[in-house]
Image (cartoon, rainbow, N blue to C red):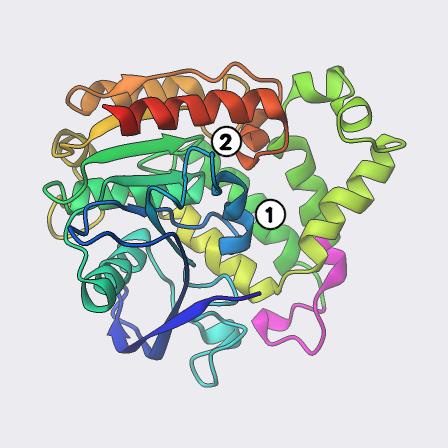
Amino acid sequence: MTHDIFELGDIQLQSGRCIRQAKLAYKTYGTLNAAKDNAIIYPTSFAATHEDAAWLIGPGRALDPERYFIVVPDMFGNGLSSSPSNTPMPGGGGRFPPVTIHDNVQQQQRLLIEKFGIETLRLAIGWSLGGAQAFEWAAAFPDRVERLFTFQSAARTSRHFHLFFDSVRAAIELDDDFRDGFYATQPLRGLRVAARIYAAWGFSQGFFRERLDETALGYASLEDFLVDFWEGWFLKRDVNNLLSHIWTGQHADISANDRYKGDLDKALASIRADTIIMPSSSDLYFPPEDAADEARKIPGAEFRLLHSSWGHVAGEGMNEADTDTIETAIRDLLAR
C-alpha cells in the first residue's frame, strides 16, 4: 500500500484532547496544474483507506487523473493516519481521543495549503462518512469549494443511524475479550456479531429478495456471503479503529463547531458550491427523504436519486449500473 504521510505535529481536537505527533496519510493522483485550480478532495469513508476509494479514479473515469489532481486523505482512525492502533501509549489503543469530522477537515486543509499551496477546490466529493467530510469542506470553507458531490451520505447523522451504530458498538464491547479497549487479542466474537448486524443494513431488502448476493456477487448461499464477505470485512480490522470511526460517525454534524453552533440549517445555507446530492433509493442508513431535505436547504442544490436495489453499498463501485449513474452525475457537475 503506497501512500504519503503529512506530519502535523501536536494537534488540538474539538474534544479538548490532543493527538501528539499526529500523522495524516494521503494518496494523490494526477498532476496539480500551474494555476492550482484542478484540485479535487475525496476523503475516505468508514473504516476505509485511500485504496478503497480508488475505484472511482482512473483515465477515462469521472475522476480522471489526466485532467485533475485528486487528493484522497485518510480519516483519522483508519489505521494509516493517526489511529488507536498506531498511536503509542498513553494516547493510543482504548485511550485514543474522539475525533470529529471538523477535526479531520481542519487538518486536511492544512495538507492542501501547506504541502501543495491549494487555495480553491474544483470539487469536494465523498461517499458515506467521506461525504460528511465533503459537506464539512463546503460549509467550513464556502469560498474555496466550487462544487460539491455527496452520495449516500448526510450533513448530520440522524438519530436512527446513531442508534444503528450503537448496536455495532455494543456487539464489540460485550465480547469478554474486549477488555475496555485494552485487549490482548482482537475480540473476534464481537466482530462476527457486528458483521451480522451490518449485513442486514449495508444492502437492502430488495438486494436479498432478488438474491443478488448469489446472482450478482457469486456466493453459493446466504451463509457463504455472510462469512466470506461480511465477516471477512470486519475480521481484518482493528477493533479500536472501528470504534473510533463509529464515534466519529455518530457525531458527524457540519454545524457542530464555533461557526454554526449547532444550527444545521445555517450551515447548509452557507454552502455556495454548485451541489449535487445523490442518495440511493434503498439506502437504510441515509434515506432519500433526509437527503432531499438537506438539498432543499443548500442554495441551488440539485437532488438526484440513484434508483438501486444495492442499498448503501450502491456507492462502493460494486455494480456497473449504479457506478455509471454516479459517474454521469460527477461528470455533469464538473462540466458546468
Residue 16 placement, left or right of 328: left
Amino acid type, label 1 = Val
**Front residue (pair 126, 242):** 126
Is 11 a magenta residue?
Answer: no
Q: Say if residue 275 shows up in the picture.
A: yes
Q: Which mark is residue 312?
A: none
Residue 285 placement, left or right of 302: right
Q: Kindly identify the residue that appears in the image at 65 percent across and 75 percent down.
A: 183
Q: Which residue is mark 2?
A: 285
| Rendered-image quadrant of the N terminus | bottom right
Q: Kindly identify the residue that appears in the image at 75 percent across and 25 percent down.
A: 216
Amino acid type, label 2 = Tyr
How far apart in space, not on screen, are marks 1 and 2 (Cα)?
13 Å
Determine crowd level at label 1: few under 14, some 14-19, many 20+ residues with C-alpha closer than 10 A. Answer: many
Q: Say if residue 254 shows up in the picture.
A: no
| Residue 34: percent from left, percent from top | 18, 54
| Residue 84: percent from left, percent from top | 50, 71
- Quarter of the image for residue 323 reads top right
SS label for mark 2: loop
Q: How many marks?
A: 2
**Front residue (pair 96, 76):** 76
SS label for mark 1: helix
- Quarter of the image for residue 75 reads bottom left
- Quarter of the image for residue 62 reads top left
| Residue 209: percent from left, percent from top | 74, 16
Residues in magenta? Answer: 177-191
**Front residue (pair 184, 313):** 313
**In this rendering, which labeled residue sits more in front, label 1 or label 2?**
2
Q: Which residue is mark 1?
A: 168
Q: Kindly identify the residue that appears in the image at 15 percent across and 22 percent down.
A: 299
Q: Vertically, is 222 above or below 19?
A: above
